[in-house]
Image: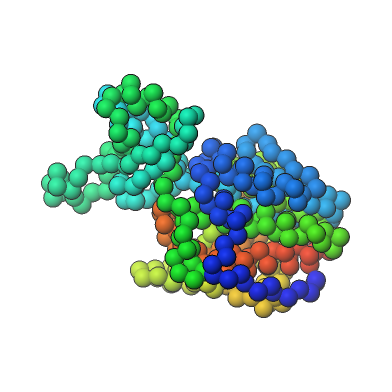
Amino acid sequence: MAKSKSAPLAAATVVPRFLSDLLAARSPSGAEHEAQAVFDAYVKAAADTYENDALGNRIATLHPAGDPVLMLAGHIDELGLQISYVNKDGYLYFNTIGGHDRVMIPGRRVIISTENGPILGVTGKRAIHLMDEADRKKVPEVHEMWIDIGAKTKKEALARVRLGDVSTYQPGFELLHGTIGVARAFDDKVGAYVVGEVLRRLAPQKKKLAARLVAVATSQEEIGTRGATTATYAVNPHLAIAVDVGHATDHPDCDPRKYGETTLGGGPIICRGPNINPFIYDRLAACARQLGIPHQFEADPRPTGTDARAMQMGRGGVATGLVSIPLRYMHTPSELVDLADVERTVQLLVSFALSLRAGEHGRW
């Protein structure tokens, strides 16, 4: 196994520009254009080959003659809303893209991506003052909410937006305290950043690699791991690791007997279970110990809710792992991540890639 020392963490005020640009990109599933452009800008020049595909994946390869083939995947899509109907008074109705908590939707500023540029809107519903006691206890259905762009008629609204336009919540990235940041879409811009950054850091030392490294920014994970399905078929890896976010359970009202015990700032979470190949699990744990970085574990007895489930079942089967970055308040407009955990995840996967030797294909 390659020996490596853990690099010092960046100062709290230093945020990687690559990551901050990904977080600023608006990229609901099926409309990942802005995040694709960021990944292109930061990763393409470091890769030996660089491809896109019909689903919008970005596939960057380093050391193409290497063995084994190692695929790292982080998804660039996020939750969103898609305009589906405009009423006579110019209010926009929508369907959800991905798994929304409906209680979070009303009263938010949203940015609608249109052919003429971004438009600001506000998600609305009936005010509490206009509800009876029974209605106040209900969470509104999606069709009972709308987006208000200040239009007065359907014609006026449709002059500014089109059916099928998508929107995201407005809040962007900010540092909350120290290395803890808050953003709309850490899920999973941090994973896409990690896989791209691993390739960028290994590019100057690719002669040390036995493996072919393929870093994939996957599309459409939030609606069914669709990009990972096609990318895994195309790459045909021996080994694959999904990099996503995982629930930090160190907050009130989260029972560790049901959800396990993982903490923000506790380091990358290494998963174990049927979705995870034992060789990859053992090697990740060994690399984390050798680096001396904080790390933690989770047990998942079924296919995980990540790209790992699609990657494992690619072609004739792929030795698959999952590394998660602890996150609080998943699928809300204000997700929390410790940037120190993000950096440690990059370090772990750099070490893992360098540790591989020819013929290590994860068969057991």
Q: Identify the residue at horizontal 79%, vertical 74% (top origin).
A: 3
Q: Please state, as top left, top right, bottom left or bottom right, where the N terminus lies in the image.
A: bottom right
Q: Identify the residue at horizontal 73%, vertical 75% (top origin).
A: 5
Q: Is residue 242 above or below residue 76?
A: below
Q: Position of residue 146 (x, y in %)?
A: 31, 37
- Residue at far front of view: 13
Q: Identify the residue at horizontal 30%, vertical 29% (top origin).
A: 151
Q: Quadrant of residue 58?
A: top right
Q: Count numbered badges in the picture.
A: 0
Q: Position of residue 206 (x, y in %)?
A: 82, 59
Q: Position of residue 42 (x, y in %)?
A: 67, 50
Q: Is residue 200 left or right of residue 187?
A: right
Q: Is residue 200 above or below residue 263?
A: above
Judging depth in this view, the residue of 320 and 191 nearest the camera is 191
Q: Taking the image as drawn, is residue 223 in sight?
A: no
Colour pattern: rainbow
Q: Identify the residue at horizontal 39%, vertical 43% (top origin).
A: 110
Judging depth in this view, the residue of 271 and 9 nearest the camera is 9
Q: Taking the image as drawn, is residue 345 in sight?
A: yes
Q: Is residue 132 above or below residue 249?
A: above
